[in-house]
Image (cartoon, rainbow, N blue to C red):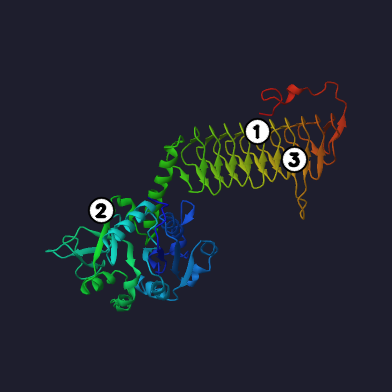
Amino acid sequence: MAGVVVAELRALVLGGGKGTRMKSSVPKLLHKICGKSMLSWVVDAVSDAGVEKVLIVTSPQIADSDEIQQMSASLISQDIPLGTGHALLQARNELESFDGNWLIVNGDTPAIRPASFSSLIQKHESSGAFITVMTSHHPFNGNMGLISRKHDTDDINAIVEYGDEDYDVNVSSEFNVGAYCIRSELLPAVIGKIPESSTNEFYITRLVEIAYAEGLLVDSYTIEDSSETIGVNTLHDLSRARLVLQNRINTYWLLNGVDIVEPCYIEISAHIDKDSVIYQNTSLQGDTHIGKGSKIGPNSRLLDTSVGADCNIFESVIESSTIGNAVNIGPFSHIRHGSYIESGVKIGNFAEIKNSRIGKEALIGHFSYLGDCFIGNKVNIGAGTITCNFDGKEKHQTIIEEGAFIGSDTKLIAPVKVGSNAITGAGSVVTKDVRSGTTVVGMPARPIDRKTPLSSDSNKEGAHSGY
């Protein structure tokens, strides 16, 4: 049912609330869950349920954030957070000017699925009720409001808030989830009647007892999956919500041909092609794409990175880079932003590459740093090689052309160019360009006669590869 547009339907997400129980400087609804904010989960879910317009009632502090500004929703300011009922009052003009149904949702309920919102809407439209409440018999939290029903008719007559004197779980086993569908034409008559609580706040739940007292029909839709009912008020709640949503993400990929050895952290924005394996303690974050048949981890972190097919990335970190097909990286290597690793490259352990392009079938030995480089095809980088790219003021480029052999512990003082099929001896300090086919050694490196030409086999792993 998710994605079906329901006629004359708008959504109001109540993003107010003090959030003091989070004990965090980050506003409650902006806390991230698997790659996007709690509020974004709610807004995306109601949008996917077929809502034609979404409004968010929130504090100015949240409204000014870049993420909220980028949402496809209108913002209504709640300068002082005085409860969900007070947030509703801030949207009074919008509520009264629209002739249709309103889906009203607490912004701290990130786990409700679009299909559940659609079912709530359908139940509301078919019953003709003034208000339909989403309820649960198996709540995820222990402090949710109780649904009160008349014993003789089973009609809903109130929602008892947690902490109220008559709150008694022995009387009712039905709980308020925090989502409602309400007919707009009847709202003006009741919205101003919400009473002030003992804590000087106003709760949207009081609409139920007001509606019942005025003879308006109150209905309910019971959600079966208790994991959808979690409301987030503390960082502990946030952790539990993350487990729920991470399980959904992992389940989706497991059912689509990806083998996941849990625990793993996979954000909602990541994409994984089938036949890949994601090993334990691996994080896939941001706009990350894993190609078919690749093996990632264990203990790896990829952020905003594209990985080709049939790669092996073992215990390494890759950020904002592109990895070609059949690339092996690690363990314990770091590919930093702006790097492009072409197909067939092998990168050993404890190597760092930054803002560089590495040509096809290049071999990069252990303990190397390559920054601001262009490395040609089939280049061999010996262990301990360093490009000295920063002169204290500016970064400079190092170019190593196809087939070159860079001996172990070479220092390349940029800007510098090593020509095709050239060789640097172990421990060389290269301060000047090296012509193609030349061998240089020493500190600083100087050309020597090379009686045996460098063959195409010299750069194969296991020959003179530095591995």
Q: In the rendered image, which residue does mark 1 sit on? A: 343
Front residue of 384/393: it is 393
Mark 2: which amino acid? His
The structure residue drawn at horizontal position 29% and vertical position 76%, both measured from the top left corner, is: 197
Judged from the image, the secondary structure of the residue bearing numbered disc 2 is loop
Q: Quadrant of the C terminus?
A: top right
The structure residue drawn at horizontal position 30% and vertical position 50%, both measured from the top left corner, is: 225
Q: In the rendered image, which residue does mark 3 sit on? A: 374
Give the mark nearest the N terminus, 3 or 1: 1
Find out whether the residues at labels 1 and 2 contact each other: C-beta distance under 8 Å.
no
Give the image location of residue 99, x and y in percent. Answer: 38, 69
Give the image location of residue 35, x and y in percent. Answer: 49, 52
Q: Look at the picture and state if 86 lies above or below 463.
A: below
Find out whether the residues at labels 3 and 1 contact each other: C-beta distance under 8 Å.
no
Front residue of 94/33: it is 94
Judged from the image, the secondary structure of the residue bearing numbered disc 1 is loop
Give the mark nearest the N terminus, 3 or 2: 2
